[in-house]
Amino acid sequence: MLYLIASYLPVLVCGIHVVRTGREYYWLWLLFIGGPVGVGIYFFAILLPELLQGRLGGRLRGGRGLGRRLLLLVDPQREYRQAVAAVEESPTVGNRMKVAEAASELGRWEEAEKILRECAVGHWANDPVILYEHALCLVELGKGTEALSRIESLKKIGGKGDTPQVNLVAARAYAGLGQIPEAEGAFRSAMDRFAGLEAAARYVTWLAQTGRKGEAEAGMADLERRYKKVPGPMRGEARAWLGLARDAIKAADKAAKAAK
């Protein structure tokens, strides 16, 4: 009996992933007919690329082990449900922030923004983590002016407001508002100190979107050179940022050709 359970457990786990992620149902036939062979095919064709590229339904934060990533692949809303349950037991600001974080990772920015807005009152009004996360949500929602207001409050705190992450959020807010000189300065400030490729990739994306094709292509070439030096375990996330910049340049080229 234990042998049968162990044999079919991988099939069941992969089947749950097929259903939860909305994939074609022929994968279910392959899994249940093919058994271990079907599981192997599904793992290398679907699960492994997702693990390497960090496509876990939202922003993949650092420090996630392989086991935790597998859990998220099978059940992307697991951490969200756990956070909501924790709030129901004890509605502290810390627990509510965990719900906001989990919602953000699922791309549920409106929900996350509402929670963070409610948290940023009283004693917590100047909490740097809340201010930063709220500004990020506001940028994702296209509310650049309000995001900059949060960032201004954050910078008044001191050193915690002067980080490459904060500068990158500010750059994205300025870019969304069409404030080109301010966006340029904030992007460059972020890139000077930002670990990883995100800041540079977002800058190249912005250059492409604003018609600065030559600069975008030069930035893309630099990104590709930097990518070659990224350590193996970090290449999945780096590849995602490289793809963001490359897609922006392709989209800009396509738009330019259509306009002719």
Image (cartoon, grey):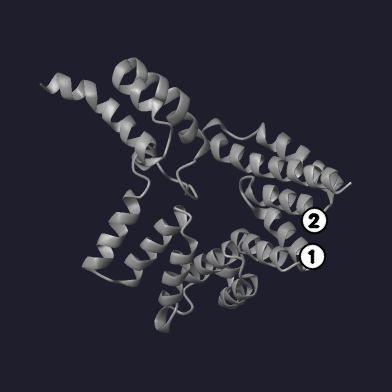
Q: Is residue 35 visible?
A: no
**From the viewer's perspective, is residue 242 above or below residue 210?**
above
Please state which amino acid type lies under the numbered disc 2.
Thr
In the picture, measured across the screen, residue 249 lies left or right of residue 109, that is right
Q: Is residue 180 visible?
A: yes
Return the residue nearer the eye: 157 or 211.
211
In the picture, measured across the screen, residue 114 lies left or right of residue 165, that is left
Q: Nearer the viewer, mark 2 or mark 1?
A: 2
**From the viewer's perspective, is residue 247 above or below residue 59?**
above
Residue 187's quadrant in the figure?
bottom right
In the picture, measured across the screen, residue 116 lies left or right of residue 158, that is left
**From the viewer's perspective, is residue 109 above or below residue 44?**
below
Residue 23 percent across, percent down from the top left: 43, 35
Return the residue nearer the eye: 242 or 34.
34
Q: Which quadrant, please, contains the N terminus?
A: top left
Q: Secondary structure at mark 2?
A: loop
Residue 229 percent across, percent down from the top left: 65, 33
Residue drawn where x is 67% and y is 61% of the image = 172
Residue 250 percent across, percent down from the top left: 75, 41
Q: Which residue is mark 2?
A: 210
Residue 25's quadrant in the figure?
top left
Q: Are marks 2 and 1 in contact (CB under 8 Å)?
A: yes
Q: Which residue is mark 1?
A: 180
